[in-house]
Image (spheres, rainbow, N blue to C red):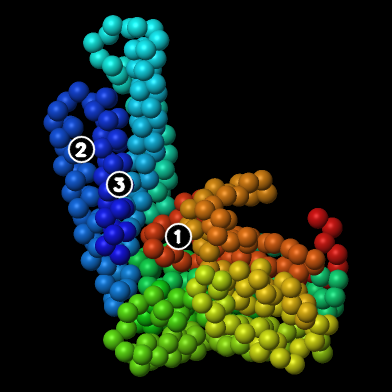
Amino acid sequence: MILRFIILASILFFVEIYAFQAFRTLLRSKWFLWAYVVISLLLYVYIFYTIFNFDRKVGQTKNSLFALGLLLTVYLPKIVLATIMFGEDVFRLLSGVTNYFIEYDNRESFFPSRRRFVSQVALGLAAIPFLSLIYGVTKGKYNYKVIKQNLFFPDLPDAFDGFTITHISDIHSGSFDNAEKINYAVDLINEQQSDILLFTGDIVNAKAEEMHPWIETFNRLTKPAFGKYSILGNHDYGAYLDWNSEEEKAKNFEEIKDLHRQIDFKLLLNEHVKIKKDNQEIALVGVENWGKHFGSMGDINKAADGLTKEDFKVVMSHDPSHWEEIVKHHEKHFHLTLSGHTHGMQFGIEIPGYFKWSLAQYMYKQWAGCYEHLGKYVYVNRGFGFHAYPGRVGIMPEITVIRLKKGQNIA
């Protein structure tokens, strides 16, 4: 831990030195330069003091969220600056070598002087992530989007043609800091008036008490005609904290499971229920967390015990790697899987229908939106809340509305 901290601190100190070159080239006032140095030093010390003193018995706090947000907001733009300034130094070095050994230039300095234009371009490019991250922290994290998706299945029971599912995931109540925005999001969910409401895990960051201030708010979620169902996510097991005892951890886990009851959701723990309509039915299969990278409690075989290949099935599984590794290859043919977990890294670029990019795609094959394999679908919700970085840039918080349709997908 200490070694990683030292390596990170050293890298960012190198970044600071190079970022300073851009300001020194453009600013003539020594007062401005000294002010920049002092502010940068104070931020550097504050950020690393907060990170280094992170208490794994307490977990994420408003202070640690702020420090991480500050880390990204300050240093991502400076990394852009440093990269360009370092590139200029490589060019200056090559130019100096060329002039010295080939052109026999008798200039006094081996290195050509820095060009103001390069520093101006560097600052202009650095402003893009800086302003984006500021927006993400102040506005983006609560910029809820309702995304609607029609999915076609030839073997969907006739009674469920047009059946609507509102899907939310990754509440992360411990990160909330604006009751007005959360109430707005709850109203937005209610406005969808879907047939069923499904929540695919991570109700908290780690501790049950994080949800306590928000229970009344989430009790405002209208119960649809076919109910409200939920599952657990990786954060709901308390695995990311250091507990005083296994008994304390177990007690917290029981309290987290009870939170679902308190907001009137039926928690499915490796089990399924039948959703019946007009003498026909579909199966809702809820598994505990199964994660390729974060440990696995989920058991799809246990959850689907008694179901056949012909039964129409909707699976709730928090981590989409479960679909990639297990569910899509399963002999029982699970028609639709609903997941979350990735948050789309809360940072990326999306142009609906044209382009979608995030660092999340280098960890997960399915990371945001709808994916299909031989007539089986997984939909990955981008998340309702936020975690670690207290903002969202490009990948907005999502409320999904899926309409099941009878027939072939003609798209």
Which one is earlier in the sequence, the residue at label 2 or at label 1? 2
Instruction: Give the position of the C terminus as an image quadrant.
Output: bottom right
Residue visible at 42% across and 65% down?
A: 387
* Tag 1 residue: 142
Which one is earlier in the sequence, the residue at label 1 or at label 3? 3
* Tag 3 residue: 12
Horizontal and vertical percent position of residue 354? 66, 45
Residue visible at 42% across and 52% down?
A: 136
Circle 2 SS class: helix
Q: Foreground residue, 185 or 370?
A: 370
Which image quadrant for residue 149?
Answer: bottom right
Between marks 2 and 1, how big is the CA–CA gap? 32 Å
Q: Is residue 30 above or below residue 338?
A: above
Q: Is residue 306 above or below residue 52?
A: below
Which image quadrant for residue 271?
Answer: bottom right
On residue 36, the disc is 2
Q: How many marks?
A: 3
- Whether the residues at callouts 2 and 1 have beta carbons within 8 Å, the answer is no
**Left or right position of 268 against 273:** left
Nearer the observer: mark 2 or 1; the answer is: 2
Q: Is residue 349 above or below residue 110?
A: below
Within 10 Å of disc 2 (Cα), the crowding (few <14, some 14-19, many 20+) is: some
Amino acid residing under circle 1: Tyr
